[in-house]
């Protein structure tokens, strides 16, 4: 009986592609143990090929990045950091981690890069505790005349813990586009710190730097944090540096969403967080187009503290993912990537203009970056209803609260729309006009579902079947011209692995 790889080689007319051979061989190994997992992978390719991905925090990494994750590096424990491990036999992991870190430092012009964190949430935890160690723990040890936490008495350690817990954090309010980890009450960050969130101006939706400065001078936070998950404008980090210096805070920036725009030299000068911040955290997917993971960039002052991510917060690093990060950083340090990053913003601005021309209200009336927030209440819908209707027609978006949203953080009044993934596929400004038109068509053809007593239901929709058919066809016509991973023969993969 022939194997899937043999079947592919026989079917390709003597012209096999390296990418397809590798993918088939990989799935063949997976299917030999659990065929359903191989089928799930193929079905996900099908799903992503058949939907316009407008989720601002998602992208498509290269096949080289994917390949770097699929190897035996995953088998190695490597707690610690290069040349300072708690396990033996880490020479190759040291090489991988050093390579990734040096690539990141070169790409961003950073003093130091720590590439171990697994996600944006845990990289922020590592950063918080590194700052607490530098600014609270070390001065306390010096005050007590000891060198190590282990030298403290139980009473002294209890006092240190109190000092840790009495520190203040100022970050962008979750309801105004900040992230859960920036001091949101439901998140551990607001339980670690006394959280004092700042908002955006209620009229313009923009950050008010003077108001933030006034608040910072009153609060005197240990950490002044900026960055966002849903704010459509660039941030003046030089201004934040001035505020931090004036109030005596450590300036921390979470650039998870826009790291690719920094790497791609779209955000420079006053808008480059690495130039101005003490500590910068980021994920490595999203606009940076790498593997799912995270890292910290920091000034030399904080490097030794950041290196203590393990045992402070993290467990064993993921060497195979660090290898993929190294590949992604190398890819991003190129002229082609800089052109990509510029196109991401141009496409976002083209999509924003097209939506506004239709009559859709956008927060701040536009965008400077890769995302925008669209108010869907004029269609008589909640964000959740709009999200569901779009997905039924082949467009993947996410509901998102608008600043001071009356519908709350679950149902929401808006959609967050982003252009990183569509730009990776090769779409341009003309395609953004078509995307805007499809969005309008679907939302106009959607009505709220009704409860049993005939009242509108926030979570239900009634999508016109004719609108669904027409919009779905437009989506597929568009995607047929911009195929995800064209190196992969999806029909063959489905035949071999989806039974």
Image: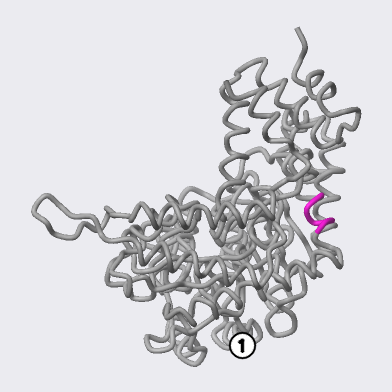
Up/down of 63 relative to 405, above or below: above
Residue at (72, 63) in percent of width and height: 297
Q: Is residue 328 magenta?
A: yes
Residue at the far top in the pictured view = 1
Which of the 4 image quarters holds residue 185?
bottom left
Up/down of 121 relative to 22, above or below: below
Up/down of 34 relative to 206, above or below: above
Residue at (80, 64) in percent of width and height: 337
Left or right of 3? Residue 383 is left
What is the count of numbered marks? 1
- Residue 199 seen from this side: no
- Which quadrant is the C terminus positioned in? top right
**Which one is nearer the viewer's eye here, 108 or 384?**
384
SS assignment at label 1: helix
- Neighbour class for label 1 at 10 Å: few (<14), some, many (≥20)? some
From the top left corner, tell me how far across and down residue 181 is, in percent: 48, 60
Residue at the far bottom in the pictured view = 210
From the top left corner, tell me how far across and down residue 390 is, in percent: 43, 57
The boundaries of the magenta stretch are 327-331
Q: Which residue is mark 1?
A: 239
From the top left corner, tell me how far across and down residue 488 is, in percent: 74, 38
């Amino acid at each position: 009986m022939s194997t899937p790889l043999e079947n592919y080689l026989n079917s390709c007319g003597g012209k096999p592609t390296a990418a397809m051979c590798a993918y088939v061989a990989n799935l063949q190994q997976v299917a030999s143990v659990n065929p359903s997992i191989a089928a799930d992978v193929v079905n996900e390719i099908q799903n992503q090929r058949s939907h316009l991905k407008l989720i601002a925090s998602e992208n498509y990494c290269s096949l080289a990045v994917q390949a770097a994750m699929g190897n035996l590096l995953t088998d190695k424990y490597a707690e610690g950091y290069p040349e300072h491990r708690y396990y033996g036999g880490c020479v190759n992991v040291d090489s991988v981690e050093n390579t990734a870190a040096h690539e990141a430092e070169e790409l961003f012009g950073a003093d130091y890069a720590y590439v171990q964190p697994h996600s944006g949430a845990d990289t922020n935890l590592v950063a918080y505790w590194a700052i607490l160690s530098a600014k609270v723990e070390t001065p306390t040890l010096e005050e007590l005349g000891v060198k190590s936490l282990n030298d403290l008495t139980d009473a002294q350690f209890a006092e240190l813990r109190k000092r840790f817990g009495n520190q203040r954090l100022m970050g962008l309010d979750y309801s105004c586009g900040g992230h859960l980890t920036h001091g949101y009450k439901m998140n551990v960050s607001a339980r670690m710190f006394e959280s004092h969130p700042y908002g955006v101006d209620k009229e313009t939706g923009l950050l008010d730097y003077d108001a933030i400065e006034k608040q910072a001078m009153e609060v005197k936070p240990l950490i002044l944090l900026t960055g966002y998950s849903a704010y459509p404008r660039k941030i003046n980090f030089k201004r934040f540096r001035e505020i931090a210096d004036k109030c005596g805070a450590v300036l921390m920036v979470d650039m998870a969403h826009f790291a690719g725009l920094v790497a791609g030299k779209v955000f420079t000068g006053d808008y480059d967080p690495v130039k101005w911040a003490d500590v910068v955290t980021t994920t490595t997917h999203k606009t940076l187009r790498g593997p799912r993971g995270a890292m910290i960039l920091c000034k030399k002052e904080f490097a030794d503290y950041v290196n203590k991510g393990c045992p402070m917060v993290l467990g064993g690093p993921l060497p195979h993912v660090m290898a993929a990060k190294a590949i992604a950083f190398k890819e991003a340090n190129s002229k082609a990537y800089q052109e990509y990053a510029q196109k991401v913003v141009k496409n976002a601005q083209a999509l924003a203009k097209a939506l506004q021309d239709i009559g859709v209200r956008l927060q701040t009336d536009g965008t400077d970056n890769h995302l925008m927030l669209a108010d869907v209440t004029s269609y008589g819908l909640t964000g959740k209803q709009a999200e569901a209707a779009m997905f039924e027609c082949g467009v993947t978006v996410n509901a998102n609260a608008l600043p001071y949203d009356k519908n709350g953080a679950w149902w929401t009044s808006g959609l967050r729309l982003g252009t990183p993934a569509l730009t990776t596929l090769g779409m341009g400004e003309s395609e953004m006009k078509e995307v805007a038109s499809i969005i309008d068509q679907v939302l106009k053809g959607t009505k709220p579902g009704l409860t049993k007593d005939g009242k509108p239901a926030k979570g239900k929709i009634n999508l016109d079947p004719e609108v669904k058919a027409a919009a779905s066809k437009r989506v597929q016509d568009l995607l047929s011209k911009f195929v995800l991973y064209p190196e992969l023969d999806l029909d063959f993969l489905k035949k071999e692995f989806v039974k």
